[in-house]
Image: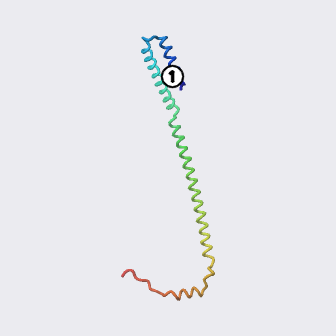
């Protein structure tokens, strides 16, 4: 708060010694310390009273809540973007599957299919209850 160095304090001490005298100096220093402590306490109490009167705690809490809301909205936007990209990927994949299913495979002819069916023996399904 005050930019007082050692040399300034030394000058104040010498002046006090000359003005008050060596006999009353300890008593004067004690009295000054008591008054300084009381002034600090009064200033601290005044700060607390002002803080309570204007509701600094409530204002701080409101600011904190607003920051949390902003973060939540940003997170919600990121989630929505991810969902939209996932939906578009899903739609593209479905379109590709539909195109694949709707276009016939020209590499396999009907005679090839008949030959595959003839090669596979008809095996009965084993009954798993036995």
Against 72, is 61 above or below? Answer: above
Query: Residue at left 44%, top 85%?
Result: 124
Q: Quadrant of residue 87?
A: bottom right
Query: Residue at left 52%, top 38%?
Result: 60
Q: Position of residue 66 (x, y in %)?
A: 55, 43
Observer-nearest of 81 and 25: 25
Q: Position of residue 107 (x, y in %)?
A: 62, 81
- Left or right: where does residue 103 sit relative to residue 47? right
From the image, tell me which residue sits under label 1.
6
Q: Position of residue 88 (x, y in %)?
A: 61, 63
Query: Residue at left 59%, top 69%?
Result: 94
Against 59, is 6 above or below? Answer: above
Label 1 neighbourhood size at 10 Å, few (<14), some (14-19), many (20+)? few
Secondary structure beneath label 1: helix
- Left or right: where does residue 82 sit relative to residue 41? right
Against 99, is 62 above or below? Answer: above
Most extreme residue toward the front is: 7
Query: Residue at left 57%, top 59%?
Result: 83
């Amino acid at each position: 708060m005050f930019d007082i160095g050692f040399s300034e304090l030394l000058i104040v001490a010498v002046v006090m010694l000359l003005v008050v005298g060596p006999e009353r100096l300890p008593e004067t220093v004690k009295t000054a310390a008591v008054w300084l402590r009381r002034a600090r306490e009064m200033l601290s109490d005044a700060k607390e009273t002002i803080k309570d009167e204007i509701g600094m705690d409530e204002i701080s809490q409101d600011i904190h809540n607003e920051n949390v809301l902003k973060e939540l909205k940003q997170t919600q936007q990121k989630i929505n973007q991810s969902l939209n990209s996932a939906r578009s990927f899903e739609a593209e994949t479905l379109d590709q599957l539909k195109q694949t299913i709707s276009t016939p495979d020209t590499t396999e002819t009907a005679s090839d299919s008949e030959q595959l069916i003839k090669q596979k023996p008809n095996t009965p399904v084993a009954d798993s209850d036995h």
